[in-house]
Structures are given as C-alpha cells and as structure tokens.
Image (spheres, grey):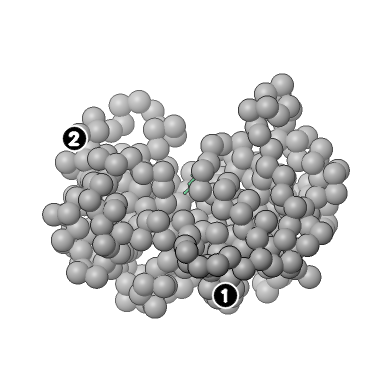
Amino acid sequence: MTGKHAEQPQRLHHLLTLAGLPQALLVALLERAAELRVAPGEPLRRHDLLSGKTVVNLFFEPSTRTRASFELAARRLGAEVLTLDMAFSSTVKGESPLDTFYTLQAMNTDLFVVRHREPGVLQTLAQHALPQVHVVSAGEGSVSHPTQGLLDVFTIRRHKQKFDGLAVAIVGDVRHSRVARSAVQALRTLGTRDIRYAGPAELLPEDLDGERFTNPDKAIAGADVVMMLRIQKERMQAGLIPDEHEYFRRYGLDAARLKLAKRDAIVMHPGPMNRGVEIAPEVADGPQSVIREQVTNGVAVRMAVLATLLQK
Ligand code: CP
C-alpha cells in the first residue's frame, strides 16, 4: 500500500502491496471476507454497501480469475462496474495508462482495479488519483499481487486455523511470481517462519527470505501447505527451463511427491494451471487440493477489500 501504511496505519486508501500492511488491518480484511464468503451452491446475498459507487477494471495484462472476481465482488456489493476491453480501447492507439486513468477518472468513478506488467505504473496512477479515488492492484509485473496474497492466507487460515508453526513449500517459478511475493509478505506478517522455495536454480528468488532447494522433495517433506506455481514463460528468456516432460519429472507435483508432505497438507495453485507441467491432474483435482476453493475465496476477499476502501 505504498508509504501510506506509515502515515495512516489503520485506514487503507490504496492497496498496491501487502508489504508493511499492519497485521491488524490484514486480519480485519480476512475477517470481513469470512463474513462475506458464500460457498458454491449457497444462495447469494446481495448487498447495497457500495450503492452509488463506480468500480473500473483496467487490465493491461490478461486475466480470468482476478478480473472476473473483482467484477462479481463489486456487483454483489451493489456497485456499478466498468470493465474496459483493452483490445478495443485507445490503448491500442498508443494512449498511456495514465491518460486512460485520467479519462475514466473524469467520468466520476470511485475505484480502479489495475493490472500492469511494468513495475511502478500502479504507484504512478495512485499518485495522480483524486483524493476520493482509490487504486487497487490486480497484479504488478513480478512485484506483487496483493489480493491473491490475501486470498491465499484466507484459504490457509480456513484449513489450518493458524500461521505460526506452519511449513509452507512454494514450488516452481518463484523468481517471476508476484503471487509468491505477496503470499510470503502476508504469511510473514501473520507469523509463519518456515517458508521454503523449490525449483530450477535459475527460477529461485534472490529477494525472498527462506530456504531454497533445487530438489523439490526436500522442500515438500513435512510441509503443511504446498503451493505450486506455473512457469511464467511471458516473463523469462527462452531456454531457462528444460522441456515440459522433463520439468514435470524433476519439479512437478504428482501423488508420489505429495506423499512427502504432511498427511493433511493442502495443495494450492493460484492458476492458471499447466496440468502435466507443474501439477498432475490427479493432484489438482484430488482430495488435498484447495485450488477451486481459492477461487471462491477470491471473490470474498475482493469484496472485503472493496467494501473496506469504499465504505465511509
Ligand atoms: N491468479 C491469477 O491472478 O489468475 P488470473 O491471471 O487468471 O487473474
């Protein structure tokens, strides 16, 4: 949330990162999400908490889960929602993200959900926001994905009821993962100390604290949570990884490898998944997988973020 944590520790205005977010604020968001969560099959509750507010989705990078869940979250809280179709926007004529933002801000809008591949663009938009306008990150390059981090810890809390004493293994392309960075920031704030990273040496992070393994079996052994990540080909140079079959053999999560974790370990993946590359279908769809539950929880967490920012 940029430097505003320090200035206003108990009041969120923008949500750009989980780094430095006070524990009390993080827990309050998780608790609000728990109140708002509706399981698949349960009747939806419609709210008018955000009646009269307009939420704009600006996704300069592709998305399925984040974009759809922010849109549903805003609608279920009673807000008006505008999701700009970037392929048919003036972005393709060369309009900058800031001019796009100024244009839509001039239409009396209240909150922008933004995804952009370039680090720093979201901070620039937040700096140029009118005082009453909020900016929420939906993913910033490899830097951060705060609402994904929130939904990940929300999901872990539902299954483990605690954070201290947990062993969390994050396996795959950790180096390029904004998901991993935000999840680790939230886990550290909530008290998780044992965080392990595994993957090819070239894809291990340099900027995250925790144990690093090139042998995933060592990271997964005894873990309570196994978080698998996809290879982000769009963010890496060609030739950094072996072919997909070889990658799966060396780093992929199959049933045999999962047996190394605790018997009640949960398997997470932020999506989109590459079945047969980082995760076997029988694990992705198996009894320890909470991958689809993460998606359900994402709507609740995004409702909590929107309601917290927009409600006076
Ligand atoms: N987890 C995630 O950010 O997925 P999308 O790219 O589909 O939004």
Nearer to me, 45 or 101:
45
- Which circle, 1 or 2, is nearer the viewer? 1
Q: Amino acid at mark 2?
A: Glu
Residue sitting at x 23%, y 46%: 280
Relative to residue 25, is residue 195 drawn left or right? left
Nearer to me, 114 or 50:
50
Residue sitting at x 43%, y 59%: 294
- C-alpha distance separating marks 1 and 2: 44 Å
Across and down, in percent, residue 261 comes to: 20, 64
Across and down, in percent, residue 188 comes to: 44, 68
Residue sitting at x 71%, y 29%: 89
Q: Which residue in the rendered view is the most extreme toward the left? A: 256
User: Is the residue marked by circle 1 packed among few (<14), some (14-19), or many (20+) residues within 10 Å?
Assistant: few
Q: Which residue is mark 2?
A: 246
Q: Which residue is mark 1?
A: 35
The picture quadrant where one finds residue 238 is top left
Q: Vertical placement of 237 versus 34: above or below?
A: above
Residue sitting at x 56%, y 53%: 69
Q: Vertical placement of 265 versus 228: above or below?
A: below
Q: Which residue in the rendered view is the most extreme toward the top? A: 93
The picture quadrant where one finds residue 202 is top left
Across and down, in percent, residue 14 comes to: 69, 58
